[in-house]
Image (cartoon, rainbow, N blue to C red):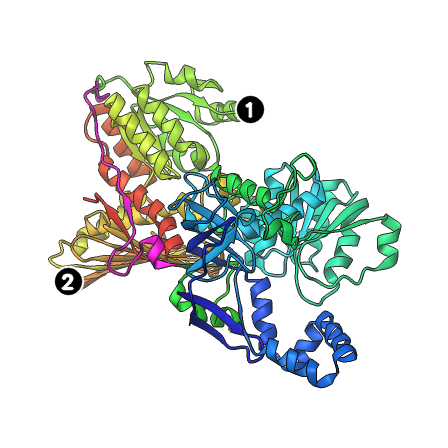
Amino acid sequence: MKQVVQNYKSGELALLDVPVPGCKPDGVLVRSAYSLISTGTELMKVSEAGMSMVGKARSRPDQVAKVMQSVATNGVPATYRKVMGKLDSYTPLGYSLCGVVEQVGAGIDDVKPGDLVACAGNEHALHAELNWVPKNLYAPVPAGLAPRHAAFGTVGSIAMQGVRRGEPQLGDVALVIGLGLIGQLVVQLLTASGVRVVGVDPDPARCELAERSGAAACGDPASAAVEAAVAELTEGHGVDQVYLAAGGGSNQPVELAAHLSRDRGRVVDIGKCSLDLPWNAYYEKELDVRFSRSYGPGRYDPAYELEGRDYPIGYVRWTERRNLACFLDLAARGRVDVEPLISHIAAFDDAVETYQGLKDGELKAVAVLFRYTEQTGETESEAPAVAVPEVKRGSGQVSATPRATKSPVRLAFVGAGNYATSMLLPHLAGREGVELSTVVTTTALSAANAKRKFGFADATTDLDAVLGDKSIDAVFVVTRHSSHADLTRRALLAGKSVFVEKPLALSDDELTGVLAAVEESGNDRLQVGFNRRFSPLLQEAKKRFGARSGPANLRYLVNAGRLQHGSWYLQQGAEGSRFVGEGGHFIDTASWLLGADPVSVYAVATSGNEDLQVVLRYPDGSTATISYVTNGAPGFPKETLDLVGDGKVLRLDDFVRASVHGPKRWVSSRLPKARDKGQNAELAAFVRAVRTGGPMPVPLESLVATTAATLAVQAGLACGAPVALTGAR
């Protein structure tokens, strides 16, 4: 079998062929599916191995002390031979993985061959194809939890033990210093515990990632914004706990901890940073300094780890194994989301190159996984697949009855936020043949404001009453992303025509639920707010481009920009990723221009999955590349598009100007115009379909295909391979 090893003397990294470990009693033999690189602990070890002997000695004074003691006891020659022999040997790397049980040793009855388990330990959960793992260092993976997510079990346990040492309580405010892998997990665990979190890290991308995971505010350690956020959240008292998840030799973390802690606050050291405590600062506040020892009670105890002697739960509630199982449970229930932390997935055969890229800084990452092809079933010739759900309309009564000529179409709005009030309602208020019947919001005042401003006949917080009102023809769902699928499903079952803002769904299960409502009710009267295909400028450009006889290539640059602090788009755990929320616009536009639905998706991303490159392949060989970036110049146009094929080029510049170059050249008016992204035309088409009973503006099959492709982007980022859209038209 293959295993990643390092020679600490020379610094050499290698992928060696080594014997398969035996399956001893009280443990299991596990074939790896994914193993996680700890970009903190492991890279520190890799970097130390590349130092000179003097550098190694300076970095490990504890080992130097042991050497000096050996010299005093055994003499210089014997000590030299012993030290050089130990240095000039291969040592393993890795301590967190997920795999499949291949063989069960005597005394094991909680798992069987074929079961999926998460494993821990720097001697047992190594970057290797097979590992023997004692029973207190593995835990079964809950149903539904992806193997790549379960591979985070060990580092999740480290973060969890650190949080337990801080003893947080509901309503506390905590400071997390260092937003690497452990720090990000600490933020999520604290947030899930009802604690408000302020994060500190010099890397803006990591700060933004932590805010998307629920942190109230994040910033550079030298930034006044961090101190201001702490003052605001604690009314000037200081944080209840500080979690030190930083590394390095700077003493800044412990000084900052003292400065921002409240009187008698707790400081928990999880990482490995300098701890030259400023005596006066810690004494005056009587700060409680605590250490968190790795995964939890049992760590470094041979009787627990190797002999399998558990600690009674009445005396030790949270052991290593119980922490591991608890973290897996939280991940399986969606209370912790590790997917945004995955920066890169590398084939295990590329392990040496991956470590070198991390060491050299070419690969910037929060978390990197090794994928073991044999267990994941992912090969170059057999791509992973995501099913595009089939649309079944059932045999029920379809709500498509034409309205009387003089009878207005009565609309209800669920939600009256910024997009509804700025981009939709202005086009509907006062429109002939439209009556704004009822606006539904969760707060009475926002409903009253919408009623006053746009002329709704009624305002309420009672959604059930609106869905039960037979006089209402159509319902607009313009709420936060997490509620779209459920509200759409309920409105369809109530027999209403539905206009839902993108996205239609945040998961495959939500999409399936919407289609189940279509099948149950026979009501397929659904439109998703993919408005760009309705833009008059883009419609004219497509007409001028004309028909195609061969495949085309489309490039779509989306200069999305940074989100403002506090934006609910940052609540990725609850509201989905930013691309899931917005990416459907661009996939729908590409598919409309190319005249088909995509058959595969390939996605790559920068660290933190902020900037994406999404490549879509279409049945006729056409391709579309969507570059979704957040770090561009604010003054550059948000959306630029080029379609190239059959000797022609269509160019769109941010819905202000367009041109077609080919046998005949066409350029839109150069007079400045407001950007028309198609909302008005889309709403007109929807209202017309509701009034006449005619087809919806976009076929439901196309809406489903676009949604499935958008969701497949996340699957593509996770597996690092093209994702086939099975069942695509």
| Residue at screen point 18% across, 21% down | 395
- Tell me the amino acid under the disc marked 1: Leu
Say the numbered circle drawn on residue 445: 1
Is residue 377 within the magenta segment? yes
Is 324 left or right of 275, judged from the image as shown?
Answer: left
Q: Which of the two residues, 44 or 693, is positioned nearer the viewer here?
A: 44
Q: Is residue 612 above or below residue 144?
A: below
The secondary element bearing badge 2 is classed as: loop
The C terminus, quarter of image: top left
The part of the image, by quadrant, that contains residue 532 is top left
Query: Residue at point 63% right, 36% down?
Result: 194
Residue topped by disc 2: 646
The residues colored magenta run 372-400
Crowding near the residue tagged with mark 1, few <14, some 14–19, many ≥20 C-alpha atoms within 10 Å = few
What residue is shown at x 73% (from left), y 84% (from top)? 76
Q: Nearer the viewer, residue 601 or 550?
A: 601
Q: Is 650 colored magenta in this rendering?
A: no
Residue 213 in view (yes/no): yes
Q: Position of residue 511 (x, y in %)?
A: 33, 35
Percent across and percent down for residue 394 are: 20, 24
- The front one of 380 and 574 is 380
Camera-side mark, 2 or 1: 2
